[in-house]
Image (cartoon, rainbow, N blue to C red):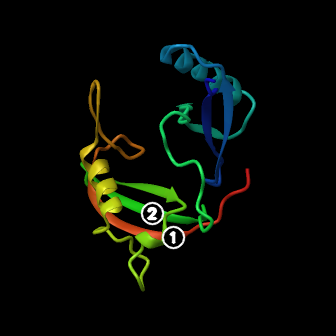
């Protein structure tokens, strides 16, 4: 079963506080259709709010049921335990951050909050993020929110962050 497409509208108020809303739409349309739809809805939303829309994202759900991934979480998993990766980019002064929920405690260096970058799984993840992933159309690289290409790892830490209620 195809998952619905989500269009997310990020909004900022005059105090600098941010929030968002998502609109779900059916699958099966072209990317151009979704972009045109999002632009039209953005204006409609703006007509009804006092904040400013800072970003609109189109998100496609992917069915992973046939990918052979583990479907049962460990009894010790906690989404509040995050692996926080800070990445260098090809633009001076700009970096990227990626939070991975439910990071395994075994990936943390004993007596610290550093993720063990010599661990095979962590080092493979870091290498893939820096090098990109080969796909049919070429290599797809990782970027920060501004589109700057990730060039290396800056830090990798374990952090505990509460999950926001939705």
Residue at image x 62%, y 35%?
A: 9
Side of 121 where 51 appears, left or right? right
Side of 63 where 20 appears, left or right? right
Label 2 crowding class (10 Å Cα cut-off): few <14, some 14-19, many 20+?
Answer: many
Dot 1: element: strand
Relative to 45, residue 163 above or below: below
The quadrant in which residue 126 appears is bottom left
Residue at image x 44%, y 77%?
A: 113
Relative to 111, residue 100 above or below: above
Dot 2: element: strand
Q: CA distance from mark 2 to mark 1?
A: 7 Å
Side of 47 where 32 appears, left or right? left
Residue at image x 30%, y 62%?
A: 120
Name the mark on residue 159.
1
Q: Which one is nearer the viewer's eye here, 147 or 5?
A: 5
Residue 45, image x, y percentages? 70, 29
Relative to 110, residue 70 above or below: above
Name the mark on residue 141.
none
Residue 111, image x, y percentages? 42, 86
The quadrant in which residue 63 appears is top right
Residue where numbered disc 2 is placed: 84
The residue sitting at the bottom extreme is: 111
């Amino acid at each position: 079963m195809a998952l619905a497409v989500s269009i997310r509208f990020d909004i900022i108020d005059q105090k600098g506080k941010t929030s968002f809303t998502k609109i779900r739409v059916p699958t099966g349309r072209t990317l151009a259709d979704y972009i045109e739809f999002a632009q039209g809805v953005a204006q409609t939303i703006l007509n009804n709010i006092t904040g400013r829309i800072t970003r609109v994202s189109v998100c496609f759900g992917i069915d992973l049921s046939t990918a052979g991934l583990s479907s049962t979480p460990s009894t010790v998993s906690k989404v509040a335990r995050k692996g926080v990766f800070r990445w260098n980019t090809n633009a001076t002064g700009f970096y990227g951050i990626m939070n991975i929920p439910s990071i395994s405690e075994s990936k943390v260096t004993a007596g610290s909050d550093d993720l063990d970058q010599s661990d095979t799984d962590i080092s493979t993840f870091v290498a893939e993020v820096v090098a990109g992933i080969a796909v049919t159309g070429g290599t797809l690289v990782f970027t920060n929110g501004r589109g700057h290409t990730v060039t290396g790892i800056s830090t990798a830490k374990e952090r505990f962050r509460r999950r926001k209620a939705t």
